[in-house]
Amino acid sequence: SALGQVLLLGGRNQDNTSTSSVRLVDLATGVCTPRADLLHARSLFAAVRLPDGGIVCAGGNSGLSTAEIWEQPVQGAVNAACMWREPPGMGVGRDGCGGCVLGDGRFAILGGRSKFTYTVTSLCEASTLGDDENWSPLSPMHDPRCSFACTAVAGCIIVAGGDPEGMPSQLRFMTRCLIVGCGFHMICLMTVDCHSWAARFCRRSMPCVRGLLTCVCTMVSCTR
C-alpha cells in the first residue's frame, strides 16, 4: 500500500498444510501484526488489491470455488477493523489460478487446475463487486494454464507463462529432481495472450524467450 505495508495471506505451513492466517507487515519497522484470518485455509490461490483498498481472494487449496473480500471499515466507524466476508462462489473450483481487477471494476479469475483431477483449464470468469455480485464467463484463453502471470492494462488482460499439465506439487518436485539427474525438462508455456474484456476476445501475442513457471508480472512506468 501507499503506507508501506504488505498483507501476507494464507499459504502452506511447515507441515505442508494450508493456513488461513493473515499478517500485516510494516516495511519501515519490520513489525508483523496478526489480522483477521481468512474464512478458508488457502494456498495456490489468486489475490488482488481493489481500488478502494480492499483485498479479494479466490480459489486455491485443491480447487476451492469460494471467494472472500477483506473490506475496509465503514467510514466513520470507531476502532473498527477490516473483516472478511464471502461473496457468491465461482462457477469453477480451481487452484493455481490468476486474478486481476478489470478497468470496469470487476474481479477476473483465469485458468488454474480443477479439484482432485489436476486438469488444467483455460476457462475465465469475472465477478461484479458491490450490491449485485455475480460471476459471468469471459472468453477462454488460447492455452490451458496454471501457475502463470497475469495483469490488466488498457482494456486487456495479459497472461504469460505457466504450467499446461498441472501436476501436483509432489510430482513437480520429483520432476525437478529428474531434471538434474537425467537431463529431462519440464513443459512450461512460452506463450503470451492478450485478452480484451470489452471486445470479448483473446488473441495470441509474442512468445516468451523461454518457458516460465510460477512467474509474476505487473505494470511499470519507464522514462527510457
Image (cartoon, rainbow, N blue to C red):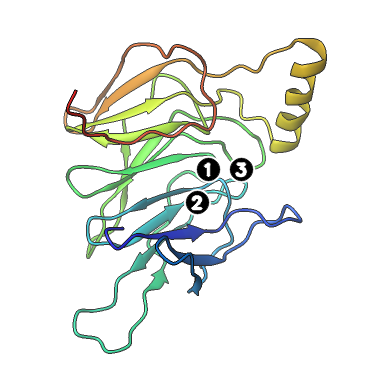
Look at mark 2 in the image and give the residue it sits on: 65
Q: Residues within 10 Å of mark 2 (few under 14, many from 20)?
A: some
Q: Is residue 82 above or below residue 78?
A: above
Residue type at numbered disc 3: Lys
The secondary element bearing badge 3 is classed as: loop
Q: Is residue 20 above or below residue 46?
A: below
Query: Going by the picture, which residue comes out furthest to the front?
Result: 29
Residue drawn at point x = 81 percent, y = 11 percent: 182
Determine if residue 140 is in view.
no
Determine if residue 172 is in view.
yes
Query: Going by the picture, which residue comes out furthest to the right?
Result: 181
Query: What is the x, y in percent for residue 15?
Result: 76, 56
Q: Are marks 1 and 2 in contact (CB under 8 Å)?
A: yes
Please tell me which of labels 1 and 2 falls first in the chain. 2
**Left or right for 150, reference 131:** right
Kindly identify which numbered label has been placed on residue 115.
3
Where, by quadrant of the figure, is residue 141 drawn?
A: top left
Kindly identify which numbered label has been placed on residue 94.
1
Q: Total of numbered circles in the picture?
A: 3
Kindly identify which numbered label has been placed on residue 124.
none
Q: Is residue 222 above or below residue 181?
A: below
Residue type at numbered disc 1: Arg
Where, by quadrant of the figure, is residue 17 drawn?
A: bottom right
The secondary element bearing badge 2 is classed as: loop
Residue drawn at point x = 37 percent, y = 27 percent: 159
Query: What is the x, y in percent for residue 174?
Result: 78, 28
- Nearest the viewer among 195 and 200 is 195
Query: What is the x, y in percent for residue 3?
Result: 29, 63
